[in-house]
Amino acid sequence: MVAFTKGHGTGNDFVIIADPDGEIELSAEQVAALCDRHFGIGADGVLRVVRSAALPEGAAALAEEPAAEWFMDYRNADGSIAEMCGNGVRVFVHYLVRAGLATIEPGTTLPIGTRAGVRDVTSSANGYQVDLGRWRLSGDDPLAKARGLEVARPGLGIDVGNPHVVVALASEEELAGLELEYIPELDPTPAGGANVEFVVPGEPLVRDGIGHVTMRVFERGVGETLSCGTGVAATALAVRHWAGAAAPDNWRVDVPGGTLGVRMFPAEDGEHVALSGPAQLVYSGTVDLI
């Protein structure tokens, strides 16, 4: 019997399991069973709350930032391991704060270990802001085919700690017509797979100095989700790239589960991208791991 908490960030939902000393070994099959929406708790993924010192992957986090006490062990709904999750980090931190395992006062930063490196989280007006670190154009710019699109569309590969392909569409009607219960096809297929974001620019694109776009996403190892934090960041970066030098560095991205903020800013090691938005805990209980 294992205790769990259910949480979400703009509808991107997670099963949270506290395992501070790294004593629970979750198999891919157990993760998939927990995330099953018919026979399990139901979620887009599992967040295991573990101290960085208690697992091998945490050594790199502690070497990068000795204050990164906590490590977000994130698994996709199919049990596969993922490098990062922007919504997941905010929910992870909200759990730490509510459980009394960490504090995050205004003006302070809480470092969290992930497989993509340490991510710094601060409180924000609408919840939490996470610095996703440096981003880059991956060079993977495949054609994307999806049910509901008559022809394949070019995609832009962007890495924000995990891989994404962003695809521009012409209208809200085209976006709504996508059948994302089917996996989009990428040609060529990135070696490690990728999340695929479909985006429609706002009309107008920029209002009061802030860019506005609407997005739907198919997450690798999960399917369509109501929100994807790193995908939101990749979407804003892609649209800014397409829009050119005059495009803003602050964006609002509408997803089926709500609205998230994205900010690009200079840092010593290059430009970083930050994601801000809400995090909520829904309920707690216990479950048998079969």
Image (tube, rainbow, N blue to C red):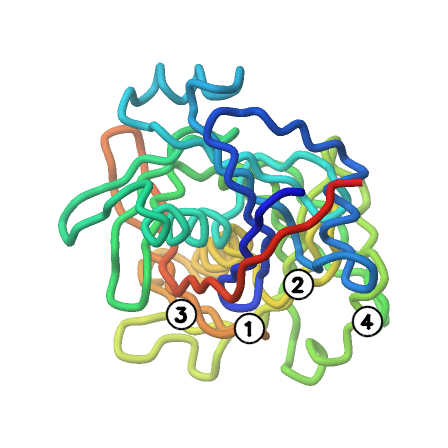
Measured in 3D between alpha carbons, the distance from the residue under mark 4 to the one under mark 1, in whole angstroms, is: 17 Å
Q: Of the two numbered discs 2 and 3 on the same chain, state the one appearing first in sequence.
A: 2
User: As shown in the figure, which amino acid type bears the numbered disc 1?
Assistant: Gly
Give the mark, 1 or 2, whose residue is nearer the N terminus: 2
* Crowd rating for badge 4 (residues with CA inside 10 Å; few <14, some 14–19, many 20+): some
Question: How far, Cα to Cα, is label 1 from label 2?
Answer: 9 Å
Residue 267 in the image: state x and y as whole percent. Answer: 24, 36
| Residue closer to the observer: 238 or 6 | 6
- Which mark is first along the chain, 4 or 2? 4
Relative to 25, does residue 203 appear above or below in the rendering? below
Circle on res. 257: 1
Q: Between disc 4 and disc 1, whose residue precedes?
A: 4
Q: Which label belongs to residue 225?
A: 2
Q: Which mark is residue 252?
A: 3
Q: SS of the residue at dot 2?
A: strand
Q: Given contact means CB atoms under 8 Å apart, are the residues at marks 1 and 2 in contact?
A: yes
